Image (cartoon, grey):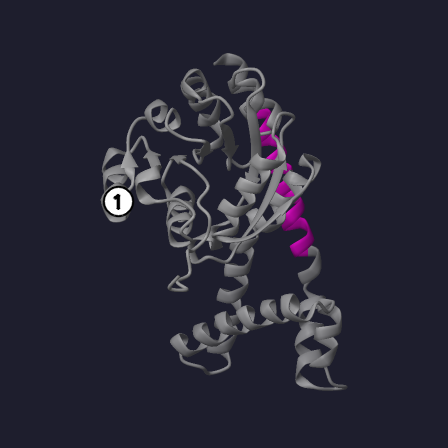
Amino acid sequence: MNGADPGPERIGTVACIGVGAMGGALVRGILRAGLVAPGDLYVADADRERLERVAAEHGVRPGSNAGAAGEADTIIVAVKPHLVPAVLQEIGPVLRPGACVVSVAAGVPLRVIEGGLPLGTAAIRAMPNTPCLVGEGAVALAAGRHAEPRHLERARRLFGAVGMAIELSETYMDAVTGLSGSGPAYVYVFIEALADGGVKAGLPRDVALRLAAQTVLGAARMVLATGRHPGELKDMVTSPAGTTIAGIAALEDRGFRGACLRAVQAAAERSRELGRLAEQEGART
């Protein structure tokens, strides 16, 4: 034996229907982790130019929705929420026995996903976020009635290739959408605002932006690495009558916490609304 690392155990064939920002990120992460060989990864997209570009870049196999789904053990549906019912109707008749369909469409509930597939098909609802593009995603998984432990383990490994994957009850998925699904946008606004503050205080724009982004990154890593409550970490840098408490007081005066709370709540409410719309679309399909 030469002692070479055999690499991760591969997990069968995978199809990704929709290779836009999220689907494309998943394709790159799955291949980078070595979970699937390029020849065992099938892709489909309504945008033919984008499909051919992704296939050429990664050496994966392009095809139609049904053509890709019919070749795969795991099918990731990464299309807009209102398109999910039509895609499910298209791929349902060609699914392999034991195949699992994983939807990453925001707000679309398992009852819609399972209702659009042949009876007994394994289904999983996933809520990833855009940091999957850089391997730092946060992904929640909710198993359908017919999903077996092997299906969930496969999904955990696939999404673990692009970040952190956790399993939750579906009752939490709209809240997840409002928090981690939409949350990167809130953080981008915060980074931009921090950088603007730096510019107002006299820093060059490029320096302010780099410092703001690295500050948010470092603070997030501190929370995850130490396991300490954010309030405790905040207190560690908040000395009496110091600069930090002056800044925190300004945030509190302007309702920063309340605005964050309302942002998550509003996005969660919109997720529930999208679910109702998808259900209506499924009833018409």
Q: Give the residues drawn in magenta, as a range.
A: 259-277
Residue 107 in view: no
The residue at the point 45 percent across, 82 percent down is 203
Decide which of 247, 284 is in the foreground and name it: 284
The secondary structure that most of the magenta stretch takes on is helix
Q: Does the magenta run of residues contain 268?
A: yes
Residue density around tag 1, few if under 14, some if 14–19, many if 20 or more, within 10 Å = some
Q: Position of residue 99 (x, y in %)?
A: 49, 27
Q: Is residue 284 left or right of residue 55?
A: right
- What residue does disc 1 label? 59
Q: Position of residue 37 (x, y in %)?
A: 35, 44
The residue at the point 33 percent across, 35 percent down is 43
Q: Where, quadrant-wise, is the N terminus in this rendering?
A: bottom left
Q: Does the magenta run of residues contain 198?
A: no
Q: Is residue 150 left or right of residue 255?
A: left
Q: Quadrant of residue 10?
A: top left
Q: Is residue 58 left or right of residue 156?
A: left
Q: Secondary structure at mark 1?
A: loop
Residue at the far front in the pictured view: 1
Residue 280 in view: yes
Check disc 1 and give the amino acid type. Gly
The residue at the point 56 percent across, 72 percent down is 218
Decide which of 238, 255 is in the foreground and name it: 238
